[in-house]
Image (cartoon, helix red, strand yellow):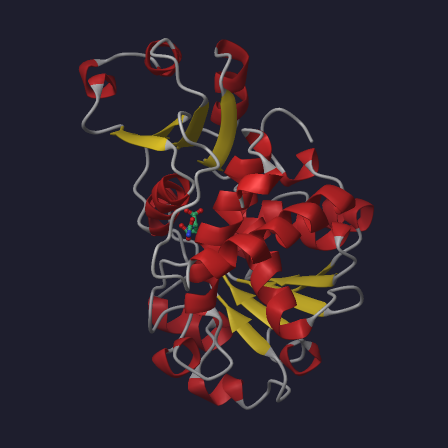
Amino acid sequence: MNKHLLSSADLDRDEVLQLLETAATMHDVQTRQVKKLPTLRGRTVVNLFFEDSTRTRSSFEIAGKWLSADVVNVSGSGSSTSKGESLRDTARTVAAMGVDALVIRHGASGAARQVSQWVDAVVINAGDGTHEHPTQALLDAYTLRSRLGDLAGRHVVIVGDLMHSRVLRSNLILLRALGARLTVVAPPTLMPSGIATWAKSDGFETAYELDPVLPQADAVMMLRVQRERMSGGYFPTAREYTVGYGLTRQRLSLLQPHAVIAHPGPMNRGLEIAADAADAAQSLVLDQVSAGVAVRMAVLYHLLGGQESAV
Ligand code: NCD
């Protein structure tokens, strides 16, 4: 395994499967009364978050704590970055305290890779701009496999604001490595530029209409409309977006009975996903959150070299 986890492409298929297997062991800890393993005792993990986060930050914190690491949270707004300190200086300052791993979220694509060149610590990318979010892809794969089994040949449909989505990019790489068939759906304005070439080289399909694709899906992954990254009008009105691309109550009936629904969160209920879909029996939204802790425990464990016997 590489020293850092910066992209889904850092992992080959065997490493993904190994991480998911470890995550399954870690998941058992969650149901115990005493949720603590001694594995990373004496190791220090810093969560360095320059963008807002609920699930990713807290699940990395919980994951580190359940493995007995010391976990410190530093956020952009409460740190010296708000006094004008550069990312390089902040990262090197934190690393100079002797931390073993830096978990970083930043608004600039490529930030995690940059930081990995500036510090000796293990760097884990928890979301860099519109580029990648590999632990999200791992937890998505974990959750989909727990319902659908082996993903080889399974059809995963990813819908929504593809242009701004790091979750999309990490999932395309990881789900392809696991042999899934992939279709991405978005309005033309929210398709990343160059998608046709990309789809051809990476072997996925694209579509501008949702209704014909839904009946063929084994899983439908809805992505958030990322208004904070939008400078102009990507669609006329929220209502029109929902009519064209929302997973509405009416559209639920287009899904096969075994098909599952995923969303990385945070959800814009009523925009890209209706409450009926988010709370449906086939919705995996909370399973994804729960898997997030287990998967991040597995990542910390493998990258920080925990002892197998301690699990
Ligand atoms: C995603 C992110 O931050 O990239 N959320 C997450 O990590 N759970 C997706 C999003 O913000 O829409």
Query: Which residue: 58% across, 70% down?
Result: 220
| 83 relative to 240, above or below | above
Query: Which residue: 62% across, 58% down?
Result: 141
In-front residue for pair 38/214: 38
Query: Which residue: 48% across, 76% down?
Result: 283
| 121 relative to 273, above or below | above
Residue 254 on image: x %, y % = 59, 87
Residue 81 on image: x %, y % = 25, 19
In-front residue for pair 126/254: 126
Residue 59 appears anywhere in the view: yes
Q: Is residue 268 left or right of residue 224?
A: left
Query: Which residue: 36% across, 63% down?
Result: 267
| 15 relative to 69, above or below | below
Residue 208 appears anywhere in the view: no
Quadrant location of residue 290? bottom left
Disc count in the image? 0
Q: Residue furthest front?
A: 309
Residue 72 on image: x %, y % = 29, 29
In-front residue for pair 228/299: 299
Quadrant location of residue 131? top right
Q: Is residue 259 left or right of residue 136?
A: right
Quadrant location of residue 100? top left
- Quadrant position of the N terminus in the picture: top right
